[in-house]
C-alpha cells in the first residue's frame, strides 16, 4: 500500500499515521465495520468495505452521484475527518512539501498514480497541528478516531 520513503523512517508521527491507515484497511479487508454516523456511504463502494480514499472529495462533480475519488485539475480537495465529536470537512490543496533533495515528505503510495495517501496525511496534519505543544506531545490526537469516529482508549501497563 505504501512505498518506502525517507520520511517514514525518521518521523514517528508519519509511522503512526501509516500504521493507523494500514490497520484499518486490514480490518476492513477481513470484516465489515461501522463508521460513526455513517449509514450507506460505504454500501455503494466495494460492498461496504472501508477505504481511506473515501474521505477525499475533489469538487469535480456536483449533485447526488456516487462518490468516486478523482483528480481535481485545480488542485483543491475536501478531506472529511471526524474531529471534536462530528464529521468535519477540511479544505486542502495538492501542493506537497519536499525536502532539500526534492523528495516528498509525506507517505506515498506504491502505485505512482495514487494521490490519496499524501492528501489524507495533509488533512490529518491539519488536525494534529491543533494538538501540538512545546514538548512535541500529541496526546489527544488519534488518527483512527479521525478516520472512523471511534473513541480510542489508551491502555497502559501498571
Image (cartoon, helix red, strand yellow):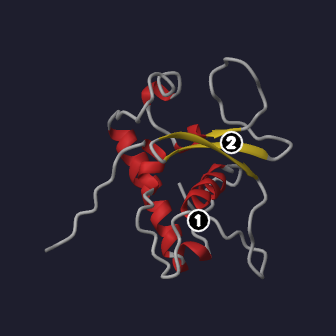
For label 1, the SS is loop
Q: Residue furthest left?
A: 158
The location of residue 77, given as percent across then percent down, is: 73, 43
Tell me the element at label 2.
strand
* Left or right of residue 152, residue 102 in this image: right
Q: CA distance from mark 1 to mark 2?
A: 17 Å
x, y percentage for residue 57? 67, 37
In x, y percent, where is residue 46?
49, 28
Hey, which quadrant is residue 67 in on the image?
top right
Residue closer to the observer: 57 or 19: 57
* On screen, residue 12 above or below 46: below
- Return the mark for residue 78: 2
Taking depth in this image into account, of 88 and 112 the one nearest to the observer is 88
The x and y percentages for residue 124 are 57, 56
Look at mark 1 in the image and give the residue it sits on: 129
At 62% from the left and 53% from the top, the residue drawn is: 123
Q: Is residue 61 left or right of residue 23?
A: right
How many numbered markers are drawn? 2
Q: Residue at x 32, y 36 (%)?
A: 31
Q: Earlier in the sequence, mark 1 or mark 2?
A: 2
Q: Is residue 3 left or right of residue 114?
A: left
Q: Residue at x 28, y 56 (%)?
A: 153
Q: Is residue 80 above or below residue 98?
A: above
Q: Is residue 85 left or right of residue 65?
A: left
Residue at 48 percent of width and 28 percent of height: 42
Label 1 crowd (10 A; few <14 / some 14-19 / many >=20): few
Amino acid at each position: 500500500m505504501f512505498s518506502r520513503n525517507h520520511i517514514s523512517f525518521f518521523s514517528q508521527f508519519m509511522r503512526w499515521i501509516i500504521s493507523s491507515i494500514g490497520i484499518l484497511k486490514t480490518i476492513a479487508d477481513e470484516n465489515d465495520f461501522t463508521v460513526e454516523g455513517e449509514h450507506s456511504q460505504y454500501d455503494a463502494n466495494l460492498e461496504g468495505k472501508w477505504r481511506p480514499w473515501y474521505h477525499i472529495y475533489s469538487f469535480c462533480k456536483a449533485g447526488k452521484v456516487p462518490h468516486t475519488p478523482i483528480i481535481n485539475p485545480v488542485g483543491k480537495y475536501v478531506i472529511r475527518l471526524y474531529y471534536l465529536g462530528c464529521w468535519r470537512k477540511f479544505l486542502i490543496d495538492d501542493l506537497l512539501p519536499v525536502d532539500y533533495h526534492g523528495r516528498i515528505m509525506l507517505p506515498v503510495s506504491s502505485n505512482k498514480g495514487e494521490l490519496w495517501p499524501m492528501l489524507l496525511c495533509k488533512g490529518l496534519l491539519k488536525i494534529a497541528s491543533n494538538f501540538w505543544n512545546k514538548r512535541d506531545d500529541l496526546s489527544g490526537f488519534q488518527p483512527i478516531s479521525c478516520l472512523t469516529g471511534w473513541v480510542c482508549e489508551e491502555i497502559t501497563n501498571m
